[in-house]
Amino acid sequence: MKKSVIFAVALMCVASLFGASKKKAKAGNDKIKIGIINNPPSESGYRAANVKDMETVFSAEKGYDVKTFYSMNNDEQLNAFSQFVTEGVDYILLSPADMAGWTSAFNKAKKAGIKVFLFDRLADVKENLYEAAVVSDMPKEGESAVAWLKAQNLKEYKVIHLQGHMGSAAQIGRTGALDKEFAAGTMKKVVQQTADWSADNAKKIVESVINSKEDFNVIYAENDDMAKGAVAALDEAGITHGVNGKVTIMGFDTNKWALRELKAGNWNYDGQCSPFQAAIIEDMIKTGKVPSKIIYNPEKGFDAKTITDSDINTYGLGD
């Protein structure tokens, strides 16, 4: 009897040790599970660079099991967020299409023990619901651009304002400073309409204004692609633009092709928006250290009269 008991105990110990060893081996092979929710790379040159940056930093080779979801629709993003929570990822990295509507989703993630990092854009949620946000200072981008525009001392400011995706942090931030000028009467709002980051949509809006015969001398486009579409409409109508042209052209994102347009004098201003946030988030994941709740990327604006080839090579995105 004693031998049987001893043998049974021995078997249990071996099984326990085997199980522990197996568990330890599994833990050692486990990858960090990350769900990334972003706008699609086709949205713009900025977004393509942003997506590539995320893919490069959070790769399988570096020990990450990554699932991605791309949409400019907030409801679709919310569904993807909920799915990642259900799947039990370790981290969710989010660039929200819209700022509003995220509180419930973030609460569910927190209860599930999933850490959320915001990148590129903020969400309208309490700070205790996410680890940190690595973003551009969108209001400052707008303020810097409008300050540059005012410094041009134009005789009048008749502005076509091409907005990005409505409700996004980029749109809200880049719109704010210009809205203050409209409200103060220092600038005239010829038209203020979303082109949803699209060159084609922007071209149609500007064509409509041209056809209406309403006068304008500034195009403030909230990204480079919309500025490109606006310029295409001006070119077809034979309206001059850029340095020494009738219409002042302003864009954001600093794609290399856009900065080349700037240096050629076809545009006047381009505001930088850095898409590189992945390495900063990875460092916080690896070290567990969060230097501050909101981390702003340093950025600047470029003027056609002073931009250099070095600026284009250093700050330009894409080819």
Image (cartoon, rainbow, N blue to C red):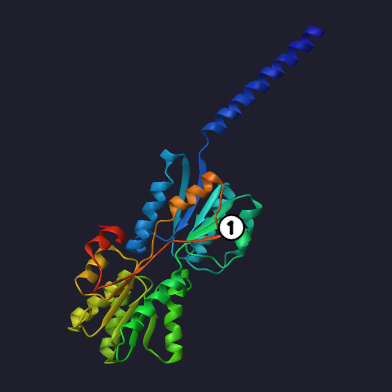
Q: Identify whether 194 is placed above or below 319.
A: below
Q: Nearer the viewer, residue 281 or 228?
A: 281
Q: Nearer the viewer, residue 309 or 32?
A: 309
Give the quadrant of residue 15: top right
Give the x, y percent position of residue 233.
24, 79
Q: Quadrant of the C terminus?
A: bottom left
Q: Nearer the viewer, residue 298 or 252?
A: 298
Q: Nearer the viewer, residue 156 or 162?
A: 156
Most extreme residue toward the left is: 238
Would you say 39 lies left or right of 86 here?
left
Give the x, y percent position of residue 187.
38, 89
Q: How many marks?
A: 1
Look at 35% across and 58% down and name the residue there: 48
Give the x, y percent position of residue 128.
63, 60
Most extreme residue toward the right is: 1
Q: Dot 1, crowdedness within 10 Å: few (<14), some or many (≥20)? A: many
User: Taking the image as drawn, is residue 166 in sight?
Assistant: no
Give the x, y percent position of residue 186.
40, 90
Would you say 164 lies left or right of 225 here?
right
Q: Quadrant of the N terminus?
A: top right
Q: Which residue is mark 1?
A: 130
Callout 1 secondary element: loop
Kind of residue sitting beneath label 1:
Tyr
User: Taking the image as drawn, is residue 100 in sight?
Assistant: yes
